[in-house]
Image: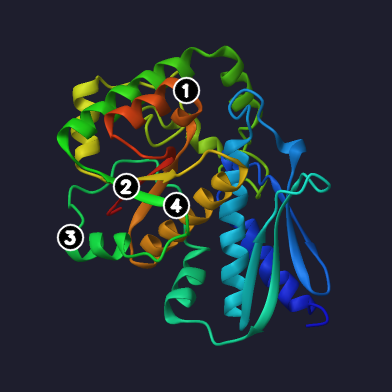
């Protein structure tokens, strides 16, 4: 190809802007070239207390990358992705080239439509559990090479997860620097623009710390109650074989691909990364679930 039309640029940029990101910081930027699109991480959107290593920032970039790929497929392009780890361009995450033309699949069209419908569900799910067919749909998502989706469902696993989430909530609630950073990124409106911070509505979410944002006023349930609630949800742990920069990007891609699949099927969901910033939580999950890789985030799904 020899360039992008204004319509193509608009559709691709709009898809990226609708991707989920840590504290709604939108820590990425697109740059259009004649032969490809570059996706950069925005280091000026760093969260030193919540995300000191930039893991969540790269997971967010991975979600945006997945949206860019879907937009290109809907436009009829076949995208080819090169994940970047170049010291001469340290902030470049990926280059996406259009290498051919093809009609998008029905699955891709459904996922693209789900982009504008996706929301973080910060409340309890309906009591109705996911049926077997829906579970098979989620587990049958093609996925991203090098990323595993691990169902967390056994009673011992749920109990261990509840203990670790309870611990992380207590730590974050008492962390003054974290609370100041969260307050600084909380917008004064219910529906902030992309990149403008967390919705003010989250201030009134007084419970369910495993699904929302932990504030000083968050009520943290006891471990038994939390385990009971978690046992009624469909929980997917995203893990990678290593814990490097590109692993974090791939984890974000896989998580968003799965999340859009559930939205297209009429489910609600949310993505949880906060507890994974604590070393003891990640180590505890690796031990309790006998993981062969590194846990990056938790997806929870259910009926709204």
Q: Is residue 275 left or right of residue 31?
A: left
| Residue to which mark 2 is pinned | 150
Instruction: Compare marks 1 and 3 and give the one earlier in the sequence.
Output: 3
Label 2 and label 3: CA atoms lie apart by 18 Å
How packed mark 1 is, by other alpha carbons closer than 10 Å (few <14, some 14-19, many 20 or more), is: few
Report helix, strand or loop for mark 2: strand
Question: Residue 135's spot in the image, x, y percent?
Answer: 24, 59
Report helix, strand or loop for mark 3: loop
Using the image, tell me which numbered label, if any, was put on residue 279: 1
Using the image, tell me which numbered label, if any, was put on residue 147: 4
| Residue to which mark 3 is pinned | 131
Q: Nearer the viewer, mark 1 or mark 3?
A: 1
Label 4 and label 3: CA atoms lie apart by 25 Å
Instruction: Compare marks 4 and 3 and give the one earlier in the sequence.
Output: 3
Q: Nearer the viewer, residue 172 or 81?
A: 81
Residue 49 in view in this figure:
yes
Question: Residue 272's spot in the image, x, y percent?
Answer: 43, 39
Instruction: Compare marks 2 and 1 and give the one earlier in the sequence.
Output: 2
């Amino acid at each position: 190809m020899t360039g992008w039309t204004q319509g193509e640029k608009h559709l691709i940029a709009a898809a990226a802007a609708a991707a989920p990101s840590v504290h709604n910081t939108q820590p990425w930027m697109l740059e259009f070239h004649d032969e490809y699109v570059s996706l950069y991480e925005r280091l000026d959107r760093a969260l030193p207390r919540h995300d000191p290593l930039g893991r969540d920032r790269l997971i967010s970039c991975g979600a945006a990358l997945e949206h860019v790929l879907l937009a290109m497929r809907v436009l009829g392009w076949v995208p080819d992705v090169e994940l970047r780890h170049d010291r001469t361009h340290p902030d470049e995450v990926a280059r996406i080239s259009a290498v051919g033309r093809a009609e998008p699949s029905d699955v891709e069209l459904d996922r693209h439509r789900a982009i504008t419908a996706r929301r973080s569900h910060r409340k309890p799910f309906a009591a109705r559990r996911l049926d077997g067919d829906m579970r098979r749909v989620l587990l049958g998502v093609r996925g991203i090479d090098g990323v595993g989706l691990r169902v967390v469902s056994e009673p011992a696993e749920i109990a261990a997860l509840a203990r670790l989430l309870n611990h992380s909530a207590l730590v974050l609630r008492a962390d003054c620097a974290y609370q100041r950073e969260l307050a600084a990124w909380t917008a004064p409106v219910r529906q902030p623009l992309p990149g403008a911070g967390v919705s003010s509505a989250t201030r009134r979410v007084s419970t369910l710390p495993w699904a929302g944002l932990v504030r000083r006023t968050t009520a943290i349930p006891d471990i038994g109650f939390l385990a009971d609630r978690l046992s009624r949800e469909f929980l997917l742990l995203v893990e990678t074989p290593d814990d490097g920069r590109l692993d974090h990007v791939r984890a974000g891609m896989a998580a968003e691909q799965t999340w859009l699949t559930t939205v297209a099927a009429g489910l609600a969901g949310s993505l949880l990364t906060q507890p994974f910033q604590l070393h003891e939580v990640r180590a505890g999950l690796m031990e309790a679930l006998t993981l062969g890789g590194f846990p990056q985030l938790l997806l929870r799904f259910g009926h709204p």
